[in-house]
Amino acid sequence: MAELAYPGTDKYSMAEFVTIMLARQAGGEGECTGGGGANQAVSLAANRLAQITVRPDLWLFTGGAGVYNGKFDTLPIGTWDPRCGHGAECKIYIADVVDGGTRGGRSGQGSSRMKAAGSGGFGGIQVDKYGNINMIGIGPHPKLKVRGPGTVGTIWMGSAPSNVYVEHHWKRVFVDKCDYISGPGWLEGGDSRHKLLNGRDGPTYIWSPICVFDFTEDEHRARIASVHPGYTVKDVLDNTGFEPVVPKDVPQTTPPTDWELNVLRTQVDRNGVLRKRRMTVGN
């Protein structure tokens, strides 16, 4: 039975920990648009936290709600939630949402304007060693054993280097090869993505409740970048269905500071959604 992911302290939840970690990764230079999957309260919170802390120029896009730069301080439960529009700078039609995602750019603007935020990410019912994700289903078509919600916005991963984020770390999620690809990562590794998608880069990170993966520079295969407090490299290997690259020295992911926690709880998630968010490890 799956166990709740636990960061080794009762001071914060694993969902709060991962949210802060994702927000930190949004720091950088250049124009940046952050988003995430429809039901990803963690990615949504991370983008909003990044705006307040490390990335004030980040454009927070919530596709389902069709708004940019909502100023909520009580956390909506997904990017489709109408509460994402509280204090937003603008609202657009769903046709423009789809059009902008297909081009890889902000609606009404060219693809050169689109940069993927480090705090944004898409999830999947399967994620493989090259960062491809599957939201279609498990098993042979048409008699699927499990039917997923479908491709929805995950196909946009082909337009921009959107990262991958999942809330459950176990072997049936992290597989050697996805049954189907609804969101392209580095495809078959090497330069396969660049050849097929006109040189567009794939994801930089995969985030989970127990670790962070990045990708090797040549094969673009998942590599353990850090392990969260409360877990070890062995825990990652025991719960991962593919063989990741393991560096000689794997650092621990840096825990949240009191300041980061205070900003998250008072300016992003006053209703405590993340303190109750369930993230799991194992079968």
Image (tube, rainbow, N blue to C red):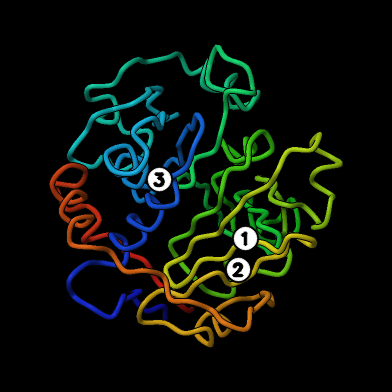
Could you tell me the amino acid type at mark 2?
A: Phe
194 relative position to 229: left or right: right
For label 1, the crowd category at 10 Å Cα-Cα, with few meaning under 14, some 14 to 19 and many 20 or more, is many
The residue at the point 71 percent across, 50 percent down is 181
Given residues 8 and 122, the one toward you in this image is: 8
Relative to 2, 266 lies left or right: left
Which numbered tag is attached to residue 127?
1
* Real-space Cα separation, disc 2 to disc 3, in angstroms: 19 Å
Task: State the CA–CA distance, disc 2 to disc 1.
Answer: 5 Å
Residue 30 placement (x, y as % from top left)? 51, 32
Residue depicted at x 19% and y 47%: 269
Callout 1: SS:
strand
* On screen, residue 214 above or below 247: above
Q: What percent of the width, then of the height, locates residue 238?
A: 56, 85
What residue is shown with label 3? 39
Q: Residue 189's quadrant in the figure?
A: bottom right
Q: Mark 2 points at which residue?
A: 174
